[in-house]
Amino acid sequence: MADQSTGPVESTAPPSRLRVFLVDDHAMFRAGVRAELGAHVDVVGEASTVAEAVVRIPATMPDVVLLDVHMPEGGGRAVLDALRRTHPEVRFLALSVSDAAEDVIGLIRGGARGYVTKTISPDELTDAIRRVAEGDAVFSPRLAGFVLDAFAARPDVPVADPELDQLTNREREVLRLLARGYAYKEIARELYISIKTVETHVSNVLRKLQMSNRYELSRWAADRRLV
């Protein structure tokens, strides 16, 4: 019988879906992201704390980790510092409400492949995840300038600041609000923490920067354009 084949048979198997892990300390936000991305990627795990993320990310081995910047215990930078050397194959995309230059540069210096803000649309976020998984660097348009400035070593961008680097992300948040004139109770309400916790953070910042009052802190923050 004559061979009826006309050539190689193409595979009809669907392409594999990207595996994504969510790190954010707000459960409602994680649920929203999971619902929006569920049709496009496989959300293989979640973590609400740095400690959970450090344990669960290696256990699930995602393609891309969506990483919140500001969380207790050091935030997204602490996750990067714990995992970037032992698991270099995992790519991190920062997803944050913050568009502050020092946050963007800090996460990129820590090893994140991109940084987008939480105003991003679901379609744009899906595309950003895909691009990061493929090895691209992805930034929200306005934030890309911070990174370009950092690589150009412009003096007005805090690329390397030993004093700033010793502060945790939460301490930086408190410092920024304090420098803007917020009272302790207003900072507590803004960050969903207690007034006592605010006082502790301020005390830690004063000690680390060797300053004595909030007015010195405000000037220090203004000099570094953190306000």
Image (cartoon, rainbow, N blue to C red):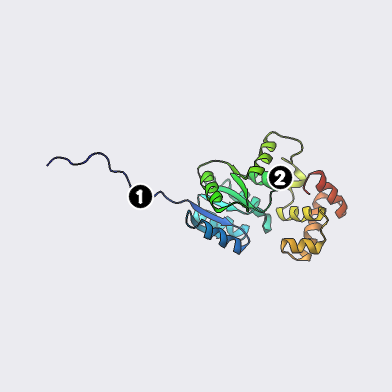
- For this orientation, the residue located farthest to the top is 152
> Is 213 or 54 nearer to us in this picture?
213
Residue 35 visible: yes
Crowdedness near tag 1: few (<14), some (14–19) or many (≥20) residues, C-alpha within 10 Å: few
Residue 32 spot, x, y in % from top left: 57, 61
Q: CA distance from mark 1 to mark 2?
A: 43 Å
Kindly indicate whether the residue at mark 2 contacts the one at mark 1 (C-beta within 8 angstroms): no
Q: Residues within 10 Å of mark 2 (few under 14, many from 20)?
A: many
- Helix, strand or loop status at disc 1: loop
Q: Confirm whether residue 61 shows in the render.
A: no
Q: Identify the residue under disc 1.
A: 13
Residue carrying label 2: 101
Which residue is painted at 85% across and 48% down in the image? 219
Q: Point out the tag, 1 or 2, that comes first from the N-terminus.
A: 1
Q: Name which quarter of the figure residue 47 lies in.
A: bottom right
Quarter location, residue 189: bottom right
Q: Going by the image, does 25 lie left or right of 88?
A: right
Q: Residue furthest left?
A: 1
Residue 174 in picture, x, y percent from top left: 77, 56
Q: Residue at x 73, y 64 (%)?
A: 193
Three-letter amino acid code at disc 2?
A: Ala
Quadrant placement of the N terminus = top left
Locate residue 173, reporting x and y percent: 74, 54
Identity of the amino acid at label 1? Ala
* Depth check, front residue: 121 or 96: 121
| Residue closest to the eye, 119 or 64 | 119
